[in-house]
Image (cartoon, rainbow, N blue to C red):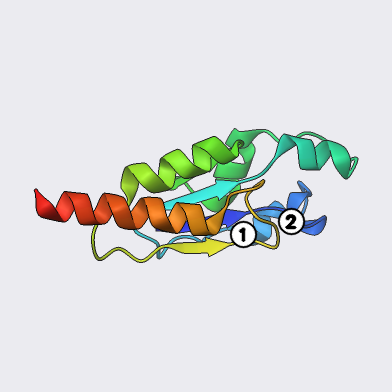
Amino acid sequence: IACMELHTFSSLQKDFLPQYSGAMDTADMAMVYYSPDVLKHKRLPELDPNFVQEQFGSGVQVVTTSDDVLSFIQGNIQKDDVLLLMSSGNFDGVDYDVLADQLLQKIRSSSLE
């Protein structure tokens, strides 16, 4: 499961996004996140999630809230999965220690069933 946050100035520019074409193709599940608030803070124009999805490819889910990031991960992670989080930020405040604890608890409880 591969999750990427677009956070840097260049990665949030519409003209740069086509360079990501195919970047997530080898992932079994792929998600791209960006924050509309970061775009405003950097004084960049809004990005249409559909445009972002088109640039990455049809198998990539695009989300714009950290709650959606967590829901994507927690809803898809299974025992023996590998989770790849790629960002120069922190997915808008995701606490990685808490996330790891939650995922381990989910995996442990599902393996007992």
Using a 10 Å C-alpha cutoff, classify the residue at mark 2 as few (fewer than 14 neighbours), some (14 to 19) or many (20 or more): some
Which residue is under mark 2?
11
Q: Is residue 29 visible?
A: no
Is residue 36 rendered to the left or right of residue 3? right
What amino acid is labelled 2 in the image?
A: Ser
Q: Is residue 26 visible?
A: yes
What amino acid is labelled 1 in the image?
A: Tyr
| Residue shown at 53% from the left, 36% from the top | 67
| Of the pair 57 and 72, the residue shown nearer to us | 72
Mark in front: 1 vs 2? 2
Using a 10 Å C-alpha cutoff, classify the residue at mark 1 as few (fewer than 14 neighbours), some (14 to 19) or many (20 or more): few
Tally of marks: 2
- Vertical placement of residue 86 versus 91, above or below: below
Is residue 59 rendered to the left or right of residue 66? left
Is residue 65 rendered to the left or right of residue 59? right
Q: Earlier in the sequence, mark 1 or mark 2?
A: 2
Q: Which of the labelled discs sits on residue 20, or is there none? A: 1
| Of the pair 84 and 17, the residue shown nearer to us | 84
Q: Secondary structure at mark 1?
A: helix
